[in-house]
Amino acid sequence: MQKNTLKERLRSGETVYGTSIGECLDPEISIVLAAAGVEFFFIDTEHSPASYGQIQSMCRTARSAGVVPLVRITQNEGPLITRALDCGAMGIVVPRVDSAEEARAAIQHMKFPPLGRRGFGLRGIVTDFESLPAAERIARANQETMAVIMIESPEGVEAVEEIATVPEIDALFVGPYDLSLSMGIVEQFEHPKFIQAMDRVLQACRKANIAMALQNDNMDLLLRARAMGVRMLMYSSDIGVLLRGYREGLARLRG
């Protein structure tokens, strides 16, 4: 069973760099991202038409290329979590978590007993077809599966200290657009209310000894977040990078 290097590096205090995939769902994208130096990505099933077949194919190529594949599910429901894991996701990104109770429910579906209540059905994409006793496969799956919980509302920020202490969480991921939208200051990432919310999440993560995550195509925001101590940074998305690259290149070519 493959080691989750992303989880391992975050636990050791390192900073990691990734992106998200929502449109370019061909498995070859994993190879391109690896060549570009991307260390992990999440397949965004919350806002894309990705099928389970596409998820499995992308996870397989990513694993082979040394890129850690995660999946952002549509909502915090058990079948969505377990099926993404059974298709090869090495971790789950859970959107719109507003309480410790909701975070614990997500963990219950990600982990096998005694840590949770995930049903046994480890497939070859997860085990690499190793002939190991079931108990060992279960223990290793629990160890390598990564849990990323999204904070995207004032309610989530208010409960963040309690959420951060839920066992088995690896990172808290601020969704900047949804958080700023729910605060009535959409895309105002310099607003004091947004900065204060970011800092509160970061302090909760530090106290719980877990990482904080942030995604954006605003490089200044990402660099500021890194300087603050955010260690799981995601630059833009597949379509965001593609659009920007073509627009900038063609504008320069046309003079």
Image: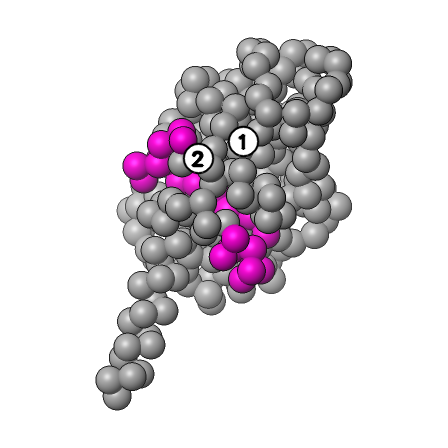
* Residue 81 falls inside the magenta stretch: no
Residue 122 placement (x, y as % from top left): 59, 19
Q: CA distance from mark 1 to mark 2?
A: 8 Å
Q: Quadrant of residue 154?
A: top left
Q: Is residue 233 above or below residue 220?
A: above
Q: Residue at x 49, y 57 (%)?
A: 32
Q: Position of residue 14 (x, y in %)?
A: 70, 52
Query: Is 36 in the magenta?
Result: yes
Residue occupied by mark 1? 88
**Residue 179: % across, % down:** 38, 44
Mark 1 touches mark 2? (CB < 8 Å): yes
- Look at the numbered disc 2 and give the secondary structure of its residue: helix
Does residue 217 appear to the left or right of 243 in the view shown?
right
Up/down of 113 relative to 159, above or below? above
Q: Residue at x 32, y 70 (%)?
A: 246
Instruction: Judge whether residue 33 can be spotted in this image.
Output: yes
Q: Which residue is mark 2?
A: 55
Q: Please name whichever residue, 59 or 201, is drawn nearer the observer in this view of the structure.
A: 59
Q: Amino acid at mark 1?
A: Gly
Quadrant for the N terminus, please: top right
Which SS class for mark 1?
A: loop
Left or right for 252, reference 232: left
Q: Which residues are magenta?
A: 31-53
Q: How many discs mark residues in the rendered view?
A: 2
Question: In which image quadrant can residue 112 be found?
Answer: top right
Left or right: 110, with 207 as reference point? left
Q: The C terminus is located in which quarter? A: bottom left
110 above or below 10? above
Where is 57 relative to 193, above or below? above
Kind of residue at badge 2: Ile
Q: Which residue does the image show at 58% across and 34% down from the upper left?
A: 90
